[in-house]
């Protein structure tokens, strides 16, 4: 198996990939999430690790949008990585010397309080990634800043960088969720502790459509563990929802919900069913289990023992 | 085709049967609704006409209970009969002579106001049917009453009865609904103006179960045209519901609702899909039509192009 | 306090009244439920005991309809009476002599199986009440029947009646629920184990109206313990619902639900809040308790610290 | 009135402010949304114009988070601004010379397709705002890029910038929504075409809580025009929702919904009721209007004509 990940090397995304594959997996960084998914679609690699959600900053919108547009993508695993930041600088620079700091805007958002307390006068310069900001200190002659905020890994891998402050995130419990995306058709078998990820456009011409969508889950006892709204870009008020639910597409109640959702919103996309990173088993009441669905189907079939007339065989 | 009906001859039920079959249908009266359904079950007759609901008095509980217990009954048609009552007596009796009146309690309930206004001093004696009360005036030596309330037909068929007052129902728009019940397996083809009749026990161990049941209809755009609660007889608070909904079991949305209902309440019974007496066509939004169900099923199937693994083929 | 009850003396209804008042309460029988309620409305008596529901036969429709029409009636208590039947006859009559049995149709329905097993050839003659049927054996010269089915009390009070068979009800757990109805304005204080009885017309011009009504309860965590549908009599499909819910009108969540229900169905009637006969305490989650309602109201008020402009002071 | 806006000068936000106030309003730019809201809270200015939502990029998370934290903020108006971008460079630079482009990441996201088609080799450098990126071309000696993407206004105001390409947004209908935020207590009077903005934490310990929240709107006929989920930052799966609904807090149905929402989620915040920018009037069915709420309240009050006992006067 060959992998890609949202690069450059040294980001939390590479860390997520290695925690899933072990240290020696053949891997290449991608310059963007769409580029990573493109490599999967092309067959250049077998799967791509990309960030999807941060407990502090929320959904990674670029990823949500990119997966929603990749018709054939399937999430086959998720990985949770605790987020920890360090402040680094070149040799000889001390904390009091720091005047301008660069990092990714998402990282900056997560250390804002620490920065206000520790470096109240510092200026911030947006960087394209945490790793790029850190490496710029080594490889650029005049990067325009004299410190960077990055993951501890980058500092370890680059001894030229000296760590001025450790564990500077405002929220010590911060965690980022990454997903491993593979090509169409791959669905890991259910484990009893599974998630299913969906993208569902909100039908605009039906008031109450969101309630209709959510009822498709609730009437089948399916719990939502994540819901994010994103604009479709067409006009204000045109949304799609990125949703994670408990359960696997091989559970009858999930398939039944998908059919109901498709009727309400035919543009629905299935992004995958895969084991939960936290391995938490989902309890399902008896009447929402496969047996109850089988019994219900058999009962309805028994009502026309000779089958339905040929011209009336629509639907299930 | 041979028929039975809730007798004796001359009741509104025979009138309902004849309006459906024409005047010459071979028919025998039954002494009770369970007896009529028994004759259908035994094959003695092909179908039974029985009253199910009166616009003034409500559900005919004996019929609701009897059909609910007859596992193989199928309603194949419904007939609406306007209800009209006459006061009859033996020869020589005038309105002022009337001291005691007999009729079925349901009929008495429908002429109560007229009786209070016209015959304020009269006593009431319950009769086993409107026709039996009327015929008692002719065939019994001392019936214990000297007038009866019955349908106009009985008076026409028995010239010994003289009509003292006509059209004496308190509600001139009163109508009774009758259903024709046949043996298992018979389902008339859909006409686009159909009803489906169900009997659904209310699960007692689930608060909110009634809402769960009704949501199975509402999330599929299915309208209820009748809902009656009846005790199961087991204990206070133990109910079943007798429900008519718009639509036919050959409509995908109805089958889908039946499956959902069966999961919530596995004791559900299907009593038949049949044309509405009023021929009123039901409008269904696009996303609740057969095409939408077919598209939804096909979409879900397309998600596993190689099918599901053999050991995971539960559910639909 | 003076009372009336659905007579004649010796019925289960008198038994219900005495179990509530003790043996010596001044009381007069009424000839019908509307007559009993009329005596309350007129001030002839202070309260009326009437049957409202039987665990086998269901709602007592005459009572449901009569209370629904009595604008000022208030239920102030409920009583449960186990139902037990005896077969009685005049002196010298043995079980094998019995050819015709009379009783109220509701009682007959509850001993049907016993009668089919024990007296398969017997004929049934409807009576106006169980007590009237039994007393007819003593006071009528030729009542037209030679046995009756009644409550054990009637047999005890009338030694001329001999008991041919005891405890002949098909369902040994059968119980009838009675309610004590008083005049307007009387609301017993809440006990923590209370019921509220409502009559709610189903708005006919709104599909989904029943769901709208039930949601008014479910969104406030209010459980339904009884729901009965009854025709309004106007036309087929025109219903009202007679509903018992857990809770007292002095509970904020019940008042809030009543306001919501009134908007959906302005013809709603409040028939009373009163202690449950079974004394079962109702558990209510914190967010549906009075404190939560008070906090919610205070919060909304705090949003306009100077009050609302005078011309905008509609609503609460 | 003095105003602030998310600076620097020349951004779309200043344009939004001027389209609301007219050209001469006294105004100062703020360095961030929190800083702008702080100036309002301090009384330095009377109101702040900040971006809240873009039709392509979605909610402006910094604004959503900042308003949610500012307890006393009240939105008093909204402004819609069509979004249009230009590519600018210093004198003598032509389109083919462009090697590196800087702009705000939100702007870059909105011209990505145009850039891929027109300047496939160009590199992107994140800027802190569109205006800052453009002005850097003039004021910085070596800014690290030789073109910028900004609003047409900046180009007009700075003749040193030459426009290399106009109207380069991928979505020509793109629009950004801004809101004007004032201090506590200010609620504009209802116009019949109003919006109310709420922030509602999702209770984590109640499965189905989102459905419970949405039902508070649906049972009162209140339509949602925007719903955005944002992490609270505490842990994965901990969300709040930023919601716009049709209607004004001076409408009884909105206040009633707020009370219901407060019970489900006591941390709810009211951010304001204000006229819709599109002036679209909201149709409300009769049973959800102030009159129906008044009638419902009066009916419930009429049920205890002498009031409630003193110790039972909780709730409304």
Image: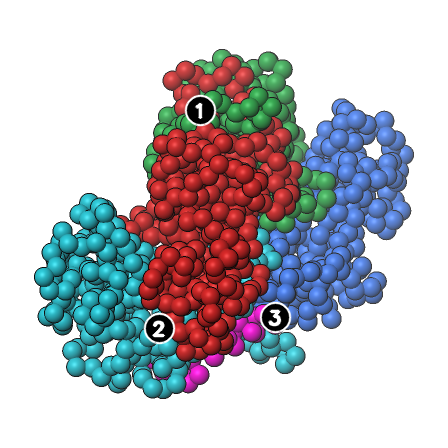
Chain colours: A blue, B cyan, C red, D green
Which of the two marks, 1 or 3, is nearer to us in this view? 1
Q: Quick check: D305 above or below C73?
A: above
- The structure residue drawn at horizontal position 56% and vertical position 18%, both measured from the top left corner, is D183
- Residue B172 in percent (x, y) is at 19, 53
Q: Which mark is residue A290?
A: 3
Determine whether, in the image, residue D136 is placed left or right of residue C104: right
Which of the two marks, 2 or 3, is nearer to us in this view? 2
Q: Is residue D274 visible?
A: no
Occupied quadrant, residue D108 = top right
- Residue C140 in percent (x, y) is at 35, 59
Determine whether, in the image, residue D92 is placed left or right of residue C287: left
The stretch in magenta equals A291-315
Can you identify the residue that label 1 sits on?
Answer: D305
- Residue C40 in percent (x, y) is at 40, 35
Which of the two marks, 1 or 2, is nearer to us in this view? 2
Can you identify the residue that label 2 sits on?
Answer: B32
Q: Secondary structure at mark 3?
A: helix
């Amino acid at each position: 198996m060959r992998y890609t990940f949202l690069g450059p090397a040294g980001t939390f995304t590479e860390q997520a990939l290695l925690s899933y594959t072990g240290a020696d997996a053949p891997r290449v960084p991608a310059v963007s999430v769409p580029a990573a998914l493109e490599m999967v679609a092309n067959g250049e690699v077998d799967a791509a690790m990309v960030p999807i959600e941060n407990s502090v900053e929320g959904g990674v919108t670029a990823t949500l949008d990119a997966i929603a547009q990749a018709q054939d993508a399937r999430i086959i695993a998720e990985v949770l990585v605790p987020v920890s930041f360090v402040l680094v600088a070149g040799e000889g620079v001390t904390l009091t010397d720091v005047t301008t700091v660069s990092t990714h805007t998402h990282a900056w958002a997560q250390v804002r309080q620490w920065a206000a307390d520790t470096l109240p006068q510092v200026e911030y310069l947006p960087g394209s990634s945490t790793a790029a900001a850190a490496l710029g200190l080594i490889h650029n002659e005049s990067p325009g800043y004299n410190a960077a905020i990055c993951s501890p890994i980058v500092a370890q891998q680059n001894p030229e960088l000296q760590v001025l402050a450790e564990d500077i995130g405002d929220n010590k419990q911060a965690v980022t969720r990454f997903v491993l995306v593979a090509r169409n058709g791959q669905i890991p078998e259910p484990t009893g502790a599974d998630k299913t990820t969906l993208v569902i456009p909100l039908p605009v011409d039906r008031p109450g459509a969101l309630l209709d969508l959510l009822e498709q889950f609730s009437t089948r006892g399916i719990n939502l563990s994540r819901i994010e709204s994103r604009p479709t870009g067409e006009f204000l008020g045109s949304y799609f929802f990125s949703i994670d639910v408990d359960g696997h597409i091989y559970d009858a109640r999930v398939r039944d919900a998908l059919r109901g959702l498709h009727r309400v919103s035919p543009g629905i996309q299935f992004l995958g069913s895969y084991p939960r990173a936290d391995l938490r088993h989902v309890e399902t009441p008896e009447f929402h289990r496969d047996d109850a669905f089988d019994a219900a189907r058999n009962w309805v079939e028994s009502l026309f023992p000779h089958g339905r007339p040929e011209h009336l065989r629509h639907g299930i």
